[in-house]
Amino acid sequence: MEVGKKIAAYRKEAALTQEELAEAMEVSRQTVYKWEHNLANPELNKLEKLIQTLNISFDDLLK
């Protein structure tokens, strides 16, 4: 599964909207949309915050 699809799936599993995840991540909703549609990738510092926010591991997201 692509990373973007995993981000979307884990976000939905956490019962968060794109807007809520964006707010928690301190990015725009458009940024979350781009991540989920593989139009952009989270920067390393955002990736760390993303896995903490979604309560997942790097392996969960990247493998």
Image: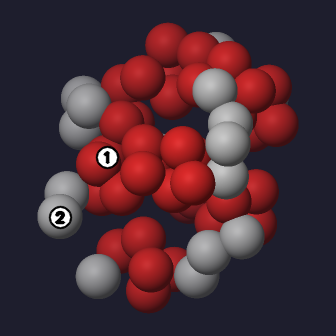
| Residue at point 29%, 82% (across, down) | 63
Q: Identify the element where label 1 is drawn.
A: helix
Identify the disc placed on residue 1. Answer: 2
**Above or below: residue 10 compared with residue 25:** below
Choose top left, top right, bottom left or bottom right for residue 27. Answer: top right
The amino acid marked with disc number 2 is: Met
Choose top left, top right, bottom left or bottom right for residue 44. Answer: bottom right
How many marks can you see?
2
Q: Residue 34 placed where, x, y %?
A: 36, 25
**Above or below: residue 14 compared with residue 36:** below
| Residue at point 68%, 18% (across, down) | 19
Q: Residue 49 placed where, x, y %?
A: 73, 57
Choose top left, top right, bottom left or bottom right for residue 39. Answer: top left
Identify the disc placed on residue 59. Answer: none
Report crowding for label 1: few under 14, some 14 to 19, many 20 or more residues within 10 A (C-alpha).
many
Identify the disc placed on residue 4. Answer: 1
The amino acid marked with disc number 1 is: Gly
Classify residue 62 as left or right of residue 46.
Answer: left
In this view of the protein, can residue 62 be seen by the observer? yes
Per the model, the C-alpha gap separating discs 1 and 2 is 8 Å
Q: Residue 4 placed where, x, y %?
A: 31, 46
Q: Residue 2 placed where, x, y %?
A: 19, 57
Q: Identify the element where label 2 is drawn.
A: loop
| Residue at point 36%, 57% (across, down) | 6
Name the image quarter holding the N terminus: bottom left
Report crowding for label 2: few under 14, some 14 to 19, many 20 or more residues within 10 A (C-alpha).
few
Which residue is outermost to the left? 1
Foreground: 28 or 17? 17
